[in-house]
Image (tube, helix red, strand yellow):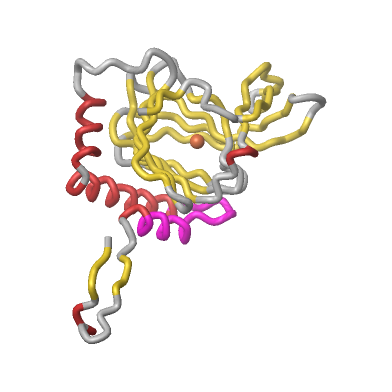
Amino acid sequence: MLQRNATNSGATPIVETPSIWETTASALRALIDRNTPGEPERQAVARELRSLHHHLRQTTPGYQGALEDALAPESRPPAVGWSWKVLADNPAVRGGLLGIYAGRPIPAHDHPGSRGALLVLTGKLRVTWFAIQRQMPGDLTELRRVAQQDCRAGETALIDAGERNIHHVVALTERCFTLNLLLSPFAEPERSWYLPIIDTEPDVMIVRRLPRKAPLRATVQ
Ligand SMILES: [Fe+2]
């Protein structure tokens, strides 16, 4: 959006007003650094995302419509996997509406070097974070579970560039919708899925690491 600076009508510079996505992304950059953010930062991120949600509801008819469609009693989940509706996609920030469904977890995956957050809009979900404990021969990797968090509506979960980057998401209700925001870099060629093979200890499992060239089963709307 462009607006004129009314206090300097002579030169009349035109300044670019950052979009709400860029404003939110900028706030999140300051809150989520490479170290694992604490509870105060998580609460601050939740406030930023709730504010983004309310702004989108008031200003973006497509957003409100997508929410209503998703929550309508007669709406059907995608045939497989989860749904992803893109709302913002530029070099600095990606955002969208994620729909996940009971019995269809999003497998563990990473966003190398990136940071981000999700805000639960409806339903409840569980996020589990993993760290790479050991590289093994071939495409096998040993992952260690480092954290787990259940989120209900209004709560947020963070992805950082450190130990809380690889994550697995499962719906704890029949369906769950979240508003997601991811900050650059996106490092697409380096992204991976981590598909479990066997648990070796309560918090340790061996997985097959696959290049994430395409979503496994996301339905992009
Ligand atoms: Fe993710």
Left or right, 197 with reference to 78? right
Residue sitting nearer the eye, 69 or 204: 69
Would you identify the image quadrant in which residue 34 lies? bottom right
Residue sitting nearer the eye, 2 or 77: 2
Residue 11 coordinates in the image, percent (x, y): 27, 84
Residue 46 coordinates in the image, percent (x, y): 36, 48
Would you identify the image quadrant in which residue 20 lies? bottom left
Q: Main secondary structure of the magenta part?
A: helix
Q: Residue furthest front?
A: 11
Vertical side of 36 occupied by 7: above or below: below
Would you identify the image quadrant in which residue 125 lies? top left
Vertical side of 180 occupied by 99: above or below: above
The count of marks equals 0
Residue sitting nearer the eye, 108 or 130: 108
Q: Residue furthest top?
A: 79
Q: Residue furthest right?
A: 137
Look at the image and say whether residue 73 sits in the magenta stretch. Answer: no
| Magenta residue span | 22-39
Residue occupying the point 29% across, 73% down:
14
Quadrant where the N terminus is found in the figure: bottom left
Residue 85 coordinates in the image, percent (x, y): 35, 33
Residue occupying the point 76% across, 33% down:
134
Residue occupying the point 35% across, 28% down:
221
Residue 197 coordinates in the image, percent (x, y): 67, 17
Residue sitting nearer the eye, 69 or 48: 69
Residue occupying the point 59% across, 30% down:
213
Left or right, 167 with reference to 66? right
